[in-house]
Amino acid sequence: MSVFIGIDLGTQSVRAMAVTRAGAVLGSAARPLTSHRDGPRHEQDPEQWWTQLCAATGEALRDVPGEQVEGVAVDATSGTILLSDDTGRALTPALMYDDRRASAERVNEVGEQVWARLGYQRMQPNWALPKLLWLLRDAPAGARLAHQNDFVNRRLAGHAVATDLSNALKTGVDLIEERWPLEVLDTLGVPAAMLPDVVRPGSVLGTVCAQAAAETGIPAGTPVIAGTTDGCAAQLGAGANRVGSWNSVLGTTLVLKGVTRDLIHDPLGVVYSHRAPDGGWLPGGASSTGAGVLTHEFPGSDLDALSELAAARADLGDVTVYPLVSRGERFPFDAPEAEPFALGTPTDDVQKYAAIMRGAAFVERLCFDYLDLLGAPVDGELILTGGGSRSAYGNRLRADVLRRPVTLRQNAEPALGMAVLAAGNSDGMVRTREVVDPTGADLREPYLEFIGELERRGWLPQAAAAHARKRAAR
């Protein structure tokens, strides 16, 4: 029986999972991670990643025969970097994915043409390349760039390793030619000698060394497989791996990840694509809306009970809440000034819950309308994951708004996605829990009212609004 180890380096924890090729989870464990936040700064200690990873893998593999383990892969938060020396020792704290101390102005000025060719128009301050320039101001001679999973992959292998194209995207790697754009980076003052080699996710980086085996419990000689970002890992865990299929993750915020044959170019820059292990493309975007508003509006409440009460109500009215977690929207449109609003007034908590879920579903529908406008195929399997997919009411509502069946998986954790990547494919490893069909409820009128309000406020571009109306009329 073959067993594959998936490791998810998240923000708050590291999780390890041992999975058979048939999808059985033989062991899993998690250990907490701590952060230091100070205004726009968000840092973690890279050494803590390793110590907590060792504890998690040791527990997850406690009852797994070593001779059955055939691969290990690690995902990491997108855009998290540090500087290390040539032995792999951390020289700086890790600047996390949402650290915004840097400026992207110089990066976008110099690399404008390259970024546009790669399907996005500009980098954000929290992307890895602006943060790398910030770190280089005081970098010692010989410092090397390391993404979050590069740091632990080196410990696993016991030698320098390549980085994967997925984690290197926000550092400016050329995903089309699969190499660093050295002329741009040289102009920015990034020495070529500090950059790791780049490979596709799924490539073999080396094997687990004896010291790492003693510390992690992963058998020496186990192949170490190049991983991905946490978002791509969740997509792999959801089994969204065929052209036209999409994974819609409704958690604190809403994130969509899909599969296309060709690179999608977005003039607004709200959609960007990762490179798939097979050379295809994984476009997606992250909204600032999501189920996180529920926690804020109903602190300490039983959200499952609210979901059941909403499902039992025959008439919840036509109230819609635009559920922004914080000021500003980033997908399916770019509007830093966007703020929450309500169309109608909820009369009680059940109606407010339903109105928030309806708003999230409308934003999700608008995301697909915008992706269709860009030419992305959106007619494949749609898989719902994230905390929001626990709501039976919400799942049925989303199927009605999208007017298509939605699939729910038994397990879609990023750690499972890394086990899938280590195994080479997801056949048999990803299991379906349920398929939810639309009830036939017609929600086009309130959806179009929602679109009109976004356009009236100047946030949604006219072309995107017109396309949404055109698709709704079909």
Image: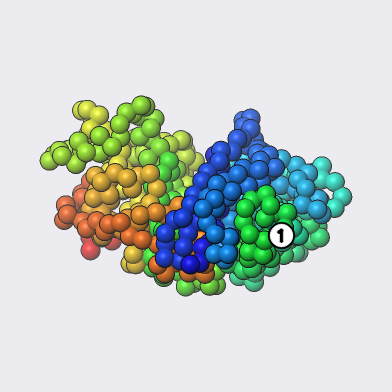
**As drawn, is 436 to the left or to the right of 165?**
left
Between residues 377 and 314, which one lies in front from this camera angle?
314
Using a 10 Å C-alpha cutoff, classify the residue at mark 1 as few (fewer than 14 neighbours), some (14 to 19) or many (20 or more).
Answer: many
Q: Residue 47: x percent and y percent?
A: 70, 42
The residue drawn where x is 72% and y is 58% is 210
Q: Quadrant of residue 137?
A: top right
The residue drawn where x is 23% and y is 63% is 474
Q: Residue 240: x percent and y percent?
A: 41, 63
- Vertical relation: 32 (above or below) 121: above
Report the number of numbered marks: 1
**As drawn, is 434 to the left or to the right of 180?**
left
**Res 19 seen here:** yes
Q: Residue 310: x percent and y percent?
A: 20, 38
- Vertical relation: 435 (above or below) 104: below
**Res 371 seen here:** no
Coloration mode: rainbow
In the current view of this chain or complex, which residue is farthest to the right?
141
Element carrying mark 1:
loop
Q: Quadrant of residue 430?
A: bottom left
The residue drawn where x is 68% and y is 43% is 46
What residue is pinned by disc 1?
A: 209
Q: Amino acid at mark 1?
A: Cys
Between residues 28 and 472, which one lies in front from this camera angle?
28
**As drawn, is 81 to the left or to the right of 91?**
left
Q: Residue 114: x percent and y percent?
A: 64, 63
- Vertical relation: 3 (above or below) 8: below
The residue drawn where x is 72% and y is 65% is 197
